[in-house]
Image: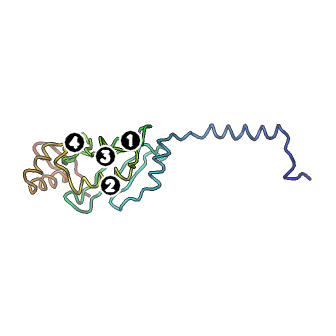
């Protein structure tokens, strides 16, 4: 009878070590960015107005966010964003784009987002939750003082009621100033 505590032959130990090394090589190494994103995602507590979707569950660096504002001018809309996080995260902010053409002072017609923490105010202590909450805030309080869509910003500054009508028209898939927008209403 062999004791569990009996010394193993050196060949057997070497074989176990080789098997462990082979298994470790098969497992993809996590980059610092992937580890940080994983941490950000596990700490994420989204309100019911936001959901994330991972087209490729094994790729945490590229995912989608859906925002459905339940108050404010954009209430009733469903807005989709893509997040692309590079390997320098958190030292560089994620790249965020809106996938729909919408009428908003802080989103241009190509889906680029004007949010200070995605540019000059980014700091590595910020996380994905900060960005997501910032995006939601843009739908509650559009900022005409830092616009990407200058016409929408000018409309908001000049005549808030007309701006609200333009938002409603655009969310139905209508045209504003000759530009047709995507229908985003639920």
Residue 180 appears left or right of 113 = left
Q: Which numbered marker is on residue 133? A: 2
Residue that badge 3 annotates? 117
Q: CA distance from mark 1 to mark 3?
A: 15 Å
Which of 63 and 105 lies nearest the eye of the viewer? 105
**Residue, x 39% and y 53% (percent of image)?**
52
Q: CA distance from mark 2 to mark 3?
A: 11 Å
Residue 185 appears left or right of 42 = left
Q: CA distance from mark 3 to mark 4?
A: 17 Å
Answer with the quarter of the image where residue 73 lies. Answer: bottom left
**Residue, x 57% and y 39% (percent of image)?**
28
Q: Quadrant of the C terminus?
A: bottom left
Farthest residue to the right: give it. Answer: 1
Instruction: Give whichever of discs 2 and 3 has the lower sequence position.
Output: 3
Callout 1 crowding tier (Cα within 10 Å): few <14, some 14–19, many ≥20: some
Residue that badge 4 annotates? 108
Q: Which numbered marker is on residue 142? A: none
* Secondary structure state at the residue bearing disc 3: helix
Q: Are circles 3 and 4 on residues that touch, CB within 8 Å?
A: no
Residue 139 appears left or right of 1 = left
Q: Are circles 2 and 4 on residues that touch, CB within 8 Å?
A: no
Q: x%, y% of residue 81?
A: 32, 47
Residue that badge 1 annotates? 84
Q: Are circles 2 and 3 on residues that touch, CB within 8 Å?
A: no
Instruction: Give whichever of discs 2 and 1 has the lower sequence position.
Output: 1
Q: Nearer the viewer, mark 1 or mark 3?
A: 3
* Secondary structure state at the residue bearing disc 2: helix
What number of labels is visible?
4
Q: CA distance from mark 2 to mark 1?
A: 17 Å
Q: x%, y% of residue 100?
A: 26, 46
């Amino acid at each position: 009878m062999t004791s569990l505590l009996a010394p193993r032959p050196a060949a057997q130990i070497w074989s176990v070590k080789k098997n462990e090394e082979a298994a470790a090589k098969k497992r993809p190494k996590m980059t610092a960015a992937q580890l940080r994103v994983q941490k950000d995602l596990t700490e994420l507590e989204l309100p019911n107005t936001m959901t994330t979707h991972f087209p490729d569950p094994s790729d945490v660096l590229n995912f989608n966010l859906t925002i459905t504002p339940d108050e404010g001018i954009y209430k009733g809309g469903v807005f989709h964003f893509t997040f692309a996080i590079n390997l320098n995260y958190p030292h560089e902010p994620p790249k965020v784009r809106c996938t729909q053409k919408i009428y908003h002072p802080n989103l241009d017609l190509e889906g680029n987002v004007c949010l200070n923490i995605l540019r000059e105010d980014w700091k590595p202590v910020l996380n994905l939750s900060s960005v997501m909450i910032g995006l939601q805030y843009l739908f509650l309080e559009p900022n005409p003082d830092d616009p990407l869509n200058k016409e929408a910003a000018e409309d908001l500054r000049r005549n808030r009621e007309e701006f609200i009508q333009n938002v409603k028209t655009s969310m139905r898939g209508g045209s504003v100033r000759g530009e047709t927008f995507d229908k985003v209403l639920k």
